[in-house]
Image (spheres, grey):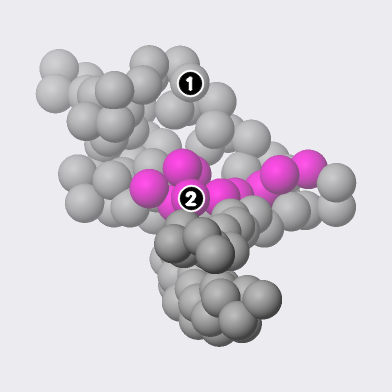
Amino acid sequence: MSNIELKVEGRIWINAGTINFVGDGKIHLLEKIKELGSLRKASLEMKMSYRQAWGQINKMNLVYNKPLVVLHRGGKDGGIAELTAFGEKIITIQKELHREFELFLDFQSKKIQNV
């Protein structure tokens, strides 16, 4: 008999049709934008290029045809990035899904321990 613990794991994505709309990485980016008020600062803190971060935000905004983030071009101090009410709602939904999914995974992990 093995002493190795079996554990069920998984990840959650929200898709828009067949396109990956949002997952943990994009949620983290949205949270950083909310915290810092800047796409540039959020991308730096997440160690990703501004272009990559902008591309992710642009894709999310276009895919669902409802913006999650509004970007305002800036002057000498840079632009401002604001999360919309829809962006806030997507974060809340993803966090709720994540909590419920973790409970499901824990339950399934306990079930397979009796195999």
Q: Image height check: is 95 above or below 45?
A: below
Label 1: which secondary element: helix
What amino acid does circle 2 point to?
Answer: Asp
Q: Position of residue 65 (x, y in %)?
A: 71, 50
Q: Is residue 32 magenta?
A: no
Inspect the image, locate mark 1, and give the three-letter code of the amino acid beneath it.
Answer: Gln
Q: Quadrant of residue 91?
A: bottom left
In the rendered image, residue 11, in percent from the top left (x then y), is placed at 58, 55
Q: Residue at x 52, y 37 (%)?
A: 57
The mark lying in front, picked from 2 and 1, is: 2
Relative to residue 91, is residue 16 drawn left or right?
right
The residue tagged 2 is 24
Q: Residue 19 appears in which quarter of the rendering?
A: top right
- Residue drawn where x is 22% and y is 30% of the image: 45
Q: Which residue is mark 1?
A: 52
What's drawn in magenta, residue-wise? 19-28
Is label 2 in a helix, a strand or a loop? Answer: helix
What residue sits 77% from the left and 53% below the top?
Answer: 16
- N-terminal-most mark, 2 or 1: 2
**Left or right: residue 15 compared with residue 24:** right
